[in-house]
Amino acid sequence: MVTLCTFLLTFGADPLPKETGTPRKPHPLAPSLSLLTDDEEKKLDTIIDRFILADTGKLDGGGAKKAMDDFKKLDEDSFFALIRGFNKSAPIDHSCPALTIGRKLASILRTSDDVSLLQYAKENIGAGVSKTQHGDVIRSLKSSCSQRINSLKSRPLPGVRNSMKP
């Protein structure tokens, strides 16, 4: 009975319910994200690990559906766990987990104005991954980071007038 309750508490709720009280501290490596507790990071890692199992056919039935649903609910606060999950799934022969995680990462990277987050992603996506069929995905994600960083750095500062225009 205790095991069932633990399972339901771990996998039966939203991945990280939004708190309505005191705002969270910003993450020191990416100030646009909330700093999560170790337990919250572990819960995200578990969600992503279960997604990888489901996507590779090692988890089926209701467990697989729940794993997929939980993965779909992940938002930008799961950024660091997604990078860990991408790096874990990149060497696996199945293409789907790495590609799906990569798409979720790309979505976060495309919309982020946090240069620190983008720099972290550029340095850590594919870290420790040697042989993989996903080299193009890794290069593409890193290139997206570089392009987004350059785009953000070239933006004019608010309130600063461009002297080249009349």
Image (cartoon, rainbow, N blue to C red):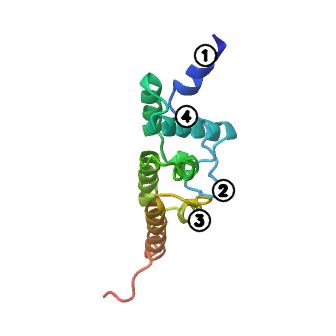
Marks 3 and 1, the one that precedes in the sequence: 1
* For discs 2 and 3, the disc positioned in front in the rendered view: 3
Q: Amino acid at mark 3?
A: Glu
- Per the model, the C-alpha gap separating discs 3 and 1 is 39 Å
**Mark 4 — residue?**
20
Q: Position of residue 74 (x, y in %)?
A: 48, 41
Residue depicted at 60% across the width and 35% down the height: 43
Asked which secondary structure carries label 4, the reply is loop
**Mark 1 — residue?**
5
**60 to the left or right of 28:** left
- Per the model, the C-alpha gap separating discs 1 and 4 is 25 Å
**Mark 2 — residue?**
28
Q: Amino acid at mark 1?
A: Cys
Q: Position of residue 50 (x, y in %)?
A: 53, 34
Q: Amino acid at mark 2?
A: Pro
**Tags 1 and 2 touching, CB below 8 Å:** no
Q: Position of residue 55 (x, y in %)?
A: 44, 38
* For discs 4 and 3, the disc positioned in front in the rendered view: 3
Residue depicted at 49% across the width and 74% down the height: 153
Q: Position of residue 2 (x, y in %)?
A: 66, 13
